[in-house]
Image: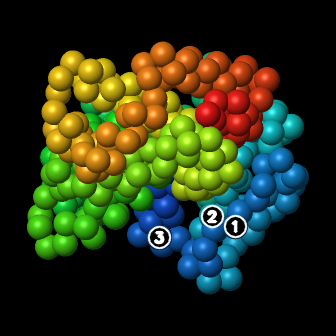
Amino acid sequence: MQTNKIESKSVYAVVGNDAFRKRQAIEAICDQLAKGGGSDEGPSRYEGAKTELAIVLDDVRTYSLLGGARIVIVEDADPFITRNRANLEKYCAEPVDSGVLILDCGSLPSNTRLYKAIAKTGQIIKCDPLKGQALQGWMVQHARDAYNKQLDRQAAWRLADLVGQSLGALDAELSKLSIFVGSRPAITPKDVEELVGRLREEDIFGITDAMASGDTATALTKWEKVLATDRAAPARAVGGLAWGFRKLLDLKLQSMSGVPMGSLARQAFTTPDVLQRRLERHDVADLQDKIKALLEADVASKNGLSTASSAIQQFIVAQSA
């Protein structure tokens, strides 16, 4: 879902930290310009950390041999802006009409002259991460627009709970779900549990089972498998492991309070005998200790004392029985 209406301009700033929304916005800009007679050459792309302003502006000012406006994108443009702020302010105040400049940046404060210049002559498109109702709305509309599927709002909440708030990851899971449901028009909470929930629990519980058995090598191998599914966001994989231990603790407490193993097994997407063996490997104090140690590992990674991946590797080695 592109919440910003794209207008035909000569300068754009695509600002924010959500890579998926930014990619969508840039694609929408290119589509809009193509409708208005943009160049068929495709956009030129430059790295903001290395590119010189003169090279970028020469490209923008060069008329396309195939006709139409050239599109020039400066990716990760924050350092590019820092190095060339004054000259960019001058250019953006009076941009040429032979080409289009797109600055893809993480931040652009609204009190700067550059922001005001682009807002006056061009367009600023904000692409910050979505949360809460906005995230749910995006998922529902994206499922409809991209995959022609109705997404139940309860299913949207559950999917975000399992996958996290990365739009790229959510898009990938919606793609899988659209194939999973086949010709059915709607994706339901049951579909999310069957496809996404089951796979997540198999992966996470594989790690906890290996740790409980003292098989550190297998636990580390399975952790790498989980992490490999989302290398760009290891913190979410850490959250998945924490969720696994909390889930085990909840199941353990329910079992101790007399909830039938068959009912618990359905919650864990496994059989009663498998879950029985899994719960027997842990006591409540052990699970509480592991959750506490995992929280400490997560804090250490966020404080820069360790990376998320290495912090969890150390956790697995230290906490394997």
> In the structure shown, which secondary structural element does the residue marked by tag 1 occupy?
strand
The quarter of the picture where residue 100 lies is bottom right
Q: Are marks 2 and 1 in contact (CB under 8 Å)?
A: yes
Kindly indicate the quadrant of the structure image that contains residue 61: bottom right
User: Which residue does the numbered mark 1 point to in the structure image?
Assistant: 44
Quadrant for the C terminus, please: top right
Who comes first in sequence, dot 3 or dot 2? Answer: 3
Foreground residue among 235 and 132: 235
Disc 2 designates what residue? 71
| Pointer 3 residue | 34
Q: Position of residue 155 (x, y in %)?
A: 21, 44
The residues bearing labels 2 and 1 have C-alpha atoms spaced at a distance of: 6 Å
Which residue type does callout 2 highlight? Ile
Q: Residue at x 18, y 23 (%)?
A: 258
- Place residue 94 in its image quadrant: top right
What residue is shown at x 38% (from left), y 55% (from top)?
A: 199
Between circles 1 and 3, the one closer to the viewer is 1
Query: Which residue type carries mark 3?
Result: Ala
The answer, for residue 111, to whether it is visible in the render is yes
The residue mark sitting in front, 2 or 1, is: 1
- Residue 130 position, x and y percent, is 41, 34
Q: Is residue 308 visible?
A: no
Label 1: few (<14), some (14–19) or many (≥20) C-alpha neighbours in 10 Å: some
Label 2 crowding class (10 Å Cα cut-off): few <14, some 14-19, many 20+? many
For the point 64% across and 30% down, the residue is 319
Sequence-earlier tag: 1 or 3: 3
